[in-house]
């Protein structure tokens, strides 16, 4: 009976440790989700800053182009000036939108990572909820006690048991000889090997 209690206590401590570990892993995954969500927000903010910086750079470039044309004596109302400045503006806007798209994609990847961490946190939380150390300990104690009770009854001759031979290579089972390769029944001529 002491062995059953010891086995039950051992199972209890193992189940309790597994439950605590699952709670810890859930908390770590939840923290990772928070970090990923913050990183996603940061990507959007950094993208907006870079996009605005690009637009300012393009405006400066357009101003330099116009000043260059004016300095060289080119008629600023000519079609070639509008073409060059217009092309600069269009390419600059394309660059700005590409920057926005790249940072949005980075943000999306971080949000997906955050969702995965959130799901992982829930999974660990469900795992922790499914572990009951007292139930595990009780089942182990009952199973161990039942095994000892069966062995005690068999030792009194009331049941089927296996008695090992001193050499470890075989023994008897319900009155039949058992070897490590098979068994042979002493009351029958059938032998299995």
Image: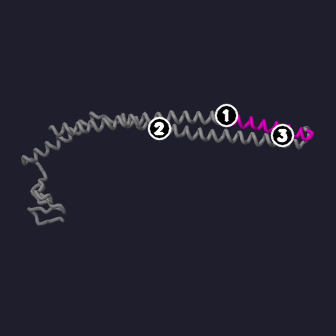
- Residue 130 found in image quarter: top left
Marks 3 & 2, CB-CB < 8 Å contact = no
Residue at the spot of label 3: 65
Q: Residue at x 73, y 42 (%)?
A: 94
Marks 3 and 2, the one that precedes in the sequence? 3
Determine which residue is flagged by label 1.
49
Crowd tier of the residue under label 1, counting other residues whose Cα lies within 10 Å: few below 14, some 14–19, many 20 or above: few
Q: Check disc 2 and report the residue beneath it.
A: 119
Where is 72 relative to 171, above or below? Answer: above
Please, what secondary structure does the residue beneath circle 1 have?
Answer: helix
Q: CA distance from mark 3 to mark 2?
A: 54 Å
Mark whose residue sits in front, 1 or 3: 3
The secondary element bearing badge 3 is classed as helix
Q: Quadrant of residue 91?
A: top right
Relative placement, left or right, of 188 versus 9 is left
Q: Position of residue 3 (x, y in %)?
A: 17, 40
Query: Where is the C terminus found, in terms of image quarters?
Result: bottom left
Q: Residues within 10 Å of mark 2 (few under 14, many from 20)?
A: some
Task: Calculate the distance from the C-alpha at mark 2 to the C-alpha at mark 1.
Answer: 32 Å
Q: Which residues are magenta?
A: 49-75
Q: Give the left or right position of residue 125, taking residue 86 as reference.
A: left
Q: Position of residue 42 (x, y in %)?
A: 59, 34
């Amino acid at each position: 009976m002491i062995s059953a209690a010891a086995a039950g206590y051992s199972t209890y401590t193992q189940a309790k440790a597994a439950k605590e570990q699952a709670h810890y892993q859930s908390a770590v995954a939840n923290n990772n989700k928070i970090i990923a969500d913050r990183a996603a927000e940061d990507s959007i903010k950094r993208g907006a800053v870079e996009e605005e910086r690009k637009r300012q750079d393009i405006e400066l470039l357009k101003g330099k182009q116009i000043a260059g044309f004016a300095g060289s004596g080119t008629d600023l109302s000519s079609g070639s000036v509008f073409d060059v400045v217009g092309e600069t503006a269009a390419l600059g806007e394309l660059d700005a939108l590409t920057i926005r798209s790249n940072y949005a994609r980075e943000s999306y990847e971080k949000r997906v990572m955050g969702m995965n961490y959130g799901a992982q946190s829930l999974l660990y939380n469900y795992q922790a909820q499914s572990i009951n150390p007292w139930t595990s300990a009780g089942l182990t104690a009952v199973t161990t006690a039942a095994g000892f009770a069966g062995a005690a009854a068999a030792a009194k001759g009331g049941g089927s048991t296996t008695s090992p031979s001193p050499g470890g290579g075989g023994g008897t089972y319900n009155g039949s000889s058992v070897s490590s390769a098979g068994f042979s029944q002493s009351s029958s001529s059938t032998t299995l090997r």
